[in-house]
Each structure stands twice: as structure tokens, then as C-alpha cells.
Amino acid sequence: MNNDWQKIQLITSAEHHFNDLCFKIRILASTWLLACMGGVGFLLSKTINVDLQTNQLLILLCWVGAIGTMVLWVLDLLIYQKLLNAWFSSREKIEHRNTDFPQIFREIKATQPGGRASNLIRVFYIALVSLPLFISMYIAIYMHEHLGWAIASATLWAAMLTCLLLKSTQEHSGELCE
């Protein structure tokens, strides 16, 4: 039992570490979107005549914002969340063996709809990816009436959204996050 308690302490420390990394990545993703939108706003405020070159630059800036967010999504949900889950699963086994330990796994899992926090986190990333791509489509269609750039933005958005949604349909029983 003493050995199990030491393991729980180690697991708790690792969970805090990976949870903190995931939190910092989400802060970075929000900051990335803010910087992208700030860049778009800055270019629009400094440009009197929004010509084709400026529109292309604005659209590319929006694409970089969306792609950067996707990279952070991969880092967050597909790498660090999986490492966090490995530690969390280890906690479950020890808590199940030692009923006198605090049943943190069961209590945390009960707070999540369907037992998975990644569904809510995924909504966060879908919003962060969608906003700059919708803005790029608006710029392409309404500010310069350039359908090719709008179609490219829509295609990029559809591909990224498909990637996010396909990943969300893969069920892993007993995990809080993918």
C-alpha cells in the first residue's frame, strides 16, 4: 500500500505537468489567433486602397493563423493529452486496487459528459481554426470578388474541419481525452 501511495504521488506530479503543458498550449493557440486577427486589423487600418496584393496578403495571414492553430491542436490533443491519459489510466488501476485512496479518477470522469473532455477541447480548436478561414473567405469574396481565393479558403477550412471531426469520432473507451 505504501508503494501504491508513492506511485499515486508520482502520477499526480506527472498529471500536473502534462495538464499544465496542455493549458499553456491552449493559451498559445488563443494568442496565436489574437495575433493573426491583430495583423489583419493592422493591415486593413494602414491600407487605404485594398487591392489584390493586399487581399492576398490578408488571406495568407488568415491561413497561417489557421494552420498554426492546427499544429497546436496536434501538439495538444494528439501528443500531450495522450501522455496525460497514460498517467491517468495508471491512476485508475491503483485507485481501483486501493478503495481507501481518494477516487479521483472516478470523480473527474463523472464531471465530463460521456467521460471525455476532448470533445469540449475540440470545439475550442474548431472555433479557433474556423474564424480566420471564414474571414479569409469574406475578404476573398466581398472585398475583392476573387472566387478562386475564396474556394481555396473554403477547401482549406473543410480539410481542417474534417481532420478535427474525424479524430473526434475515434472512440477510446475509458479515456477522458484522446
Image: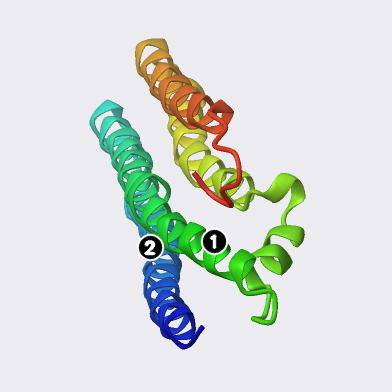
Please state if 161 lies on the left or on the right of 176 as rendered: left
Label 2 sits on residue:
25
Please state if 148 lies on the left or on the right of 112 as rendered: left
Rendered residue at 41%/78% (across/down): 7
Q: Is residue 80 visible?
A: yes
- Neighbor class of circle 2 (other Cα within 10 Å; few <14, some 14-19, many 20+) is some
Residue 75 vertical placement versus 111 (above, below): above
Q: Which comes before the other along the chain, label 1 or label 2? A: 2
Counting from the top left corner in percent of width and height, residue 15 is at 44, 72
> CA separation, marks 1 and 2?
28 Å
Under circle 2, the secondary element is: helix
- Neighbor class of circle 1 (other Cα within 10 Å; few <14, some 14-19, many 20+) is few
Q: Which residue appears farthest toward the bottom when viewing the image?
A: 2
Q: Which residue appears farthest toward the front when viewing the image?
A: 1
Counting from the top left corner in percent of width and height, residue 162 is at 49, 22
Rendered residue at 51%/37% (across/down): 130
Under circle 1, the secondary element is: helix
Counting from the top left corner in percent of width and height, residue 57 is at 26, 37
Q: Amino acid at mark 1?
A: Lys
Label 1 sits on residue:
93
Counting from the top left corner in percent of width and height, residue 22 is at 42, 63
> Of residues 59 and 78, which is closer to you in this image?
78
